[in-house]
Amino acid sequence: MALRVIKPGMLTTVQDAGRWGYQAHGVPVAGPMDPCSHRLANALVGNARAAAALEVTLLGPEIEFDEERVIAIAGAEFAVTLDGRSAPLHAPFVVPPGARLTFGARHRGARAYLAIAGGIATPPVLGSRATHVISRMGGLDGRPLRAGDVLPLFNARRVQSAGAPTAPVLPMPERDARIRVMAGPQQDRFRADALDALLSAPYTIRQDSDRMGFRLQGPPLAHADGADIISDATPLGVLQVPASGQPILLMADRQTTGGYPKIATVISADIPIAGQLAPGDTIRFEICTPQQAMAALIAQERALMPLEADRS
């Protein structure tokens, strides 16, 4: 009951819902960059929403299965083949024993999620199988997959059959995305025109970005009185701004605290969209009210929850 990695891809890691509850002790959360697509892939094969799956980044792997399983791929649009034949996205399908699944060209989005019925059974660390590469925690020895790795699988709870494709819960961005933010928590640490500057033009994701954070290049954001503050918590999706004035969008592998002021925070419903961007892509920020943020999250949950209920 395992899968074997023939080719690892660029950055393929084991990710469950994340290592929540330990940030006060300095332990990062990790988990999927696009939690929406991660949940969708798990729902399609009948797994619990937090089950461990593979996150495939930009260049996908080649994987061999040692037994029949039902799997599903959600998120970024790749050309995927099973023993040389085209495989569907956003739909469960059966993989026979000895079959090879290969990720080819990427068309849209940056990260796909491969869920296997039963889930990946690597040992949990602090209650989670999520890989945090910087601290070498979770997943398979705390690192991306390598050729020759063997990943253990749980037994599937029940036999799942192939099904019709499901519409993606969110549209994949094509190298540009509009991301909604709410001001704060430290907007008062910036000049009065800084928020307008943030919204005035697109920001490009720099090449030195990673799962910890997207370093952005665009209109500089001026501080009111220096760029240093007493370190405090760094929520998912917050835009912290160092002395350069160029914001950093903190993502899944973010540090637990930071000493730069934070001008705005991406709303929860748009974190999955941000998670589908890659270096060289652009982000256009839009201001959002709390009511609009809540409505967007409710709409997203209404799309996901029936799929999870139907296959639980």
Image: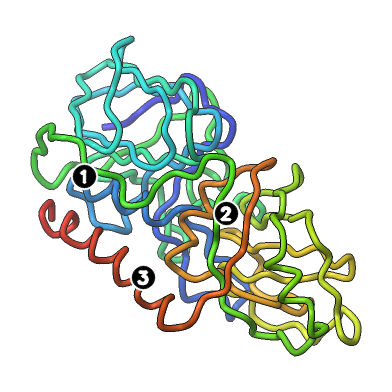
Q: Nearer the viewer, mark 3 or mark 2?
A: 3
Residue 37, percent from left and from top: 37, 49
Residue 183, percent from left and from top: 62, 80
Q: Secondary structure at mark 1?
A: helix
Q: Residue furthest bottom?
A: 188
Q: Which mark is residue 297?
A: 3
Q: Which residue is mark 1?
A: 44
Three-letter code, disc 1: Leu
Disc 1 to disc 3, C-alpha distance: 21 Å
Q: Which residue is mark 2?
A: 132
Seen in the image, is 274 located left or right of residue 291? right
Quarter of the N terminus within the rendering = top left
Q: Nearer the viewer, mark 1 or mark 2?
A: 1
Towards the viewer: 239 or 94: 239
Considering only vertical position in the picture, is 190 above or below 210? Answer: below
Seen in the image, is 5 located left or right of residue 101? right
Disc 3 to disc 2, C-alpha distance: 26 Å
Q: Residue at x 51, y 21 (%)?
A: 7
Three-letter code, disc 3: Leu
Q: Earlier in the sequence, mark 1 or mark 3?
A: 1
